[in-house]
Image (spheres, rainbow, N blue to C red):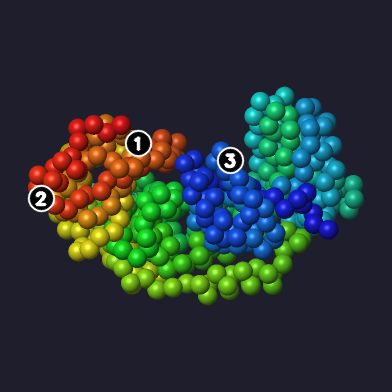
Amino acid sequence: MSIFQDDRIIIKTLSGLEEALGEELKQIGATQVEILRRAVACNGNQELLYNINYKSRLSLIVIRPLKSFYAETPEQLYDGVRSIEWMKILDVGKTISVKASTYKSALDHTQYISQKTKDAIVDYFRDKFGHRPSVDTFDADIQINVHLNENQCEIGLNSSGNPLFKRGYRQATGLAPINEVLAAGLIALSGWDKKSNFIDPMCGSGTLAIEAAMLAQNIPAGYYRNNYSFMHWSDYDRTLWKKVKDAADNEMTDFEGLILATDISPKSIEIAGKNIHFAKLHKDIELKQIDIRNLNYPEGNGVIIINPPYGERIKTKDISDLYQAIGDSLKLKATGYDAWVISSDLEAIRLIGLRPHKRHVVFNGSLECRFNGFKVFKGSKKDQYQQNYTTEDE
Ligand SMILES: C[S@@+](CC[C@H](N)C(=O)[O-])C[C@H]1O[C@@H](n2cnc3c(N)ncnc32)[C@H](O)[C@@H]1O
């Protein structure tokens, strides 16, 4: 008998990526996919759970619900947690941590909720075996999630452990690196066909280019990572995990197109180079130090994604000049490309001076951003002017 209440799996993601994650999960084999706020739920077995952890580019953590009960008082919370058969889930030598969240509930202190939950688990083991698992708030083997929503308590196990954006390839970072899940999400939202060119003219630590190269070659998102929390669960099936991994690794393919990552800063190029080499993608990604003002986009077509400084975390001398330069670069040299810009700076985005054909709202950390797509049309100078240029944006 499974230790879990049903076959439900909850997958957390970043705001704005829910629909794209739903599609990705269907491709991985999930059924009964339901879009939630910053999460997607689906049905699946242990094999799917391993597959999502290994293959999904848009998932932050994958949770397996354990038990749901009503808890308005500390005693109800304690009793509910203690009634779970923890010995079927972990052995006493493992370390544990508890992460709590609460919404419109009588128990409204996350620290208290997490302490009470830990007490119940520890007492369960002490009473049964005379020993207790240790708590490790930093990197525990078993990570327990407690969520209270209008006094309904959901206890779940985080099967991923460290969030899945920690892919394992990032050896160094620049000043404002983009989260790997967000980078993969932007590529998904751009609709890049994985065949044409992919250009990141402000590459920083190289995240977008690396994610594009992984996607194009079907390199599993977890290829460079070797630890997941489910490996510490009592039901861990090593043979099944190897089967899942081998099957995914066998699906890797070649990519014939061009991935180009450029940046004005020598330091960024050095950092991106380290990450790209670590990921063994140096033959797949061309890296070049150049100001976007002097960049000539390669012949052909494809997608350009630009993650410029927003003027919030990085100070450049003149953000307005920079966004105007981005606009000029696209209008004059990127004909035929589908160009995308992510920025929290709405005023600056307007200065690009192109009319977006698509707009998405995403969050880069706590910053609400626009991710706007601009098509740069071919044609006479007059045609281009009419199709591309605008004075309005939002
Ligand atoms: C927000 S960071 C990009 C972060 C990147 N996506 C990552 O994951 O690390 C913006 C980058 O734009 C670069 N940049 C600023 N002005 C530039 C210019 N004129 N031409 C090219 N790159 C520029 C900066 O050096 C910086 O690395």
Drawn side of residue 175 relative to residue 57, left or right: left
**Residue drawn at point x = 40 percent, y = 73 percent:** 254
Q: Split into 4 quadrants, where in the image is the N terminus?
A: bottom right
Q: Is residue 215 visible?
A: yes
Identified by mark 1, the residue type is Ser
Relative to the observer, which residue lies in front, 268 or 261? 261
Q: Which residue is mark 3?
A: 36
Residue 60 picture location, percent across and down: 54, 49
Q: Which residue is mark 2?
A: 380
Q: Which residue is mark 1?
A: 344
Q: Secondary structure at mark 1?
A: loop
Q: Which mark is residue 203?
A: none
Residue 330 picture location, percent across and down: 20, 49
Identified by mark 3, the residue type is Leu
Using the numbered discs, state the Cα–Cα distance from disc 3 to disc 2 in whole angstroms: 46 Å
**Residue drawn at point x = 68 percent, y = 32 percent:** 149
Residue 304 picture location, percent across and down: 29, 54
Relative to the observer, which residue lies in front, 30 or 118? 30
Drawn side of residue 17 relative to residue 80, left or right: left
Q: Split into 4 quadrants, where in the image is the C terminus?
A: top left
Q: Secondary structure at mark 3?
A: strand
Q: Secondary structure at mark 2?
A: loop
Drawn side of residue 331 relative to residue 343, left or right: left
How would you rate the neighbour count of disc 1 (Cα within 10 Å): few for under 14, some for 14-19, many for 20 or more? many
Q: Is residue 173 visible?
A: no
Residue 219 picture location, percent across and down: 47, 67
**Residue drawn at point x = 68 percent, y = 43 percent:** 145
Q: Is residue 392 above or below residue 235?
A: above
Question: Which quadrant of the view contains residue 213?
Answer: bottom left
Please name which of the two marks, 3 or 1, marks the residue nearer to the observer.
3
Of all residues shown, which one is farthest toward the left? Answer: 381
Identified by mark 2, the residue type is Ser
